[in-house]
Image: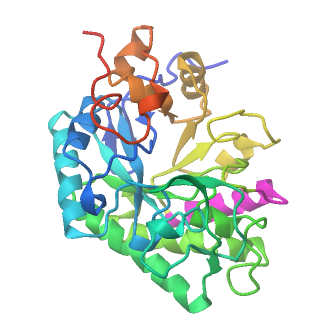
Amino acid sequence: MTRDDAPTLYDPIRIGAIDMANRIVMAPLTRSRAAEGLVPPPMAAEYYGQRATAGLIITEATQVSVMAQGYIATPGLYTPAQVAGWKQVTDEVHRRGGRIVVQLWHVGRVSHVSLLPPGEVPVAPSAIRAKTKTFAPEGYVEVSDPRALALEEIPGIVEDFRHAARCATEAGFDGAEVHGANGYLIDQFLRDGSNKRTDAYDGSIENRTRLLAEVTEAVASTMGADRVGVRLAPVTPANDMHDSDPQALFERAVERLDGLGIAYVHVIEGATGGPRDNLPFDYAALKAKFRNAWIVNNGYDRQMAEAAVREGRADAVAFGMAYIANPDLVRRLREHAPLNQANRDTLYGGGPEGYIDYPALD
């Protein structure tokens, strides 16, 4: 039973230093439309601006360095040109009254040599190739064999995130989300299926959560902890991921994040883009480890989202695919209006079609 004064999905909320007009979040959505130099294209400003009624926009995953890329035409945030491109986006979102944070990303082993500088191969905690594919210039291909990062290289990874956070501030973002989910580099360090190191970054859960804590602290020290969130996906098998004890692992990970005082944790419940009950997991116990805002994600419809906020299981709810086809999703949810369906043929790459031409209710 809920209180009569329980919050609703449509009520404002302050998450850290960010004032949100409602509790509906646009989840990060890769669209693979970056221009030359991995700069967001001019139409990205219109795309994100159209969706500025979201309480918070989290951008598509954005590389922190040249070695962080794993898919064709995904944007970066480490060069002056990329900063300028993103500044056009943040300016437009703010002009329309919205709030926007950038998701900072390093793909680790989920990459292909054709996407990296000449002579380079993907990096990972251990030299274990993921059983997955990626989009490269030559099409849909198996990822390349990675090499294990040397211990002395890891501080450089942390600095890449710190530099990207500085760039995010310069680009006018309201904050940043560290991508620790879906089988990318930080997640690869977290889980014992991909991390077989024998140094300060493996063995115990404490060691495997070290990189997550170090990267998050670096971003928080640059932007302010009250402008930083982290995305986690405790049981998703995406990109060939698994762990022997995810409950203990992710409870400790969230405890460490709580100690940093960050604004929010953003949790994918179940398999990313798939079943919510693929493996047993106690999300309420995970939430209990964190004092600040809790954002949930994966397969939520209007009724589920409204109930999660009303019953106190979440402070906000992130929507993914629905935001691709419904720039006015907040209004549609509030008015119980029908939703546009996304054209899957235009999800990745291309031009305005399937990107900025989905109609609003009016």
Residue 200, horizontal then vertical, whole percent: 69, 85
Q: Quadrant of residue 168?
A: bottom left
The front one of 252 and 120 is 120
Q: Main secondary structure of the magenta part?
A: helix
Q: Up-down: is 232 above or below 320?
A: below
Q: Report the magenta residues as a range.
A: 242-260
The front one of 76 and 230 is 76
Residue in the picture at 40% in, 42% down: 31
Q: How is the image coloured?
A: rainbow
Residue 34, horizontal then vertical, whole percent: 31, 51
Asked if residue 23 shows in the view, the reply is no
The front one of 219 and 171 is 171
In-image side of 148 versus 320 (left or right):
right
Asked if residue 315 shows in the view, the reply is yes
> Which residue, as the protein is rendered here, is positioned at the far bottom?
152
Q: Is residue 245 magenta?
A: yes
In-image side of 358 versus 3 (left or right):
left
Residue in the picture at 59% in, 31% down: 312
The quarter of the rendered structure image containing the N terminus is top right
In-image side of 172 versus 260 (left or right):
left
Q: Quadrant of residue 86?
A: bottom left
Residue 25, horizontal then vertical, whole percent: 43, 35
The quarter of the rendered structure image containing the C terminus is top left
Q: Is residue 266 magenta?
A: no
Residue in the picture at 67% in, 34% down: 274
Residue in the picture at 42% in, 15% down: 340
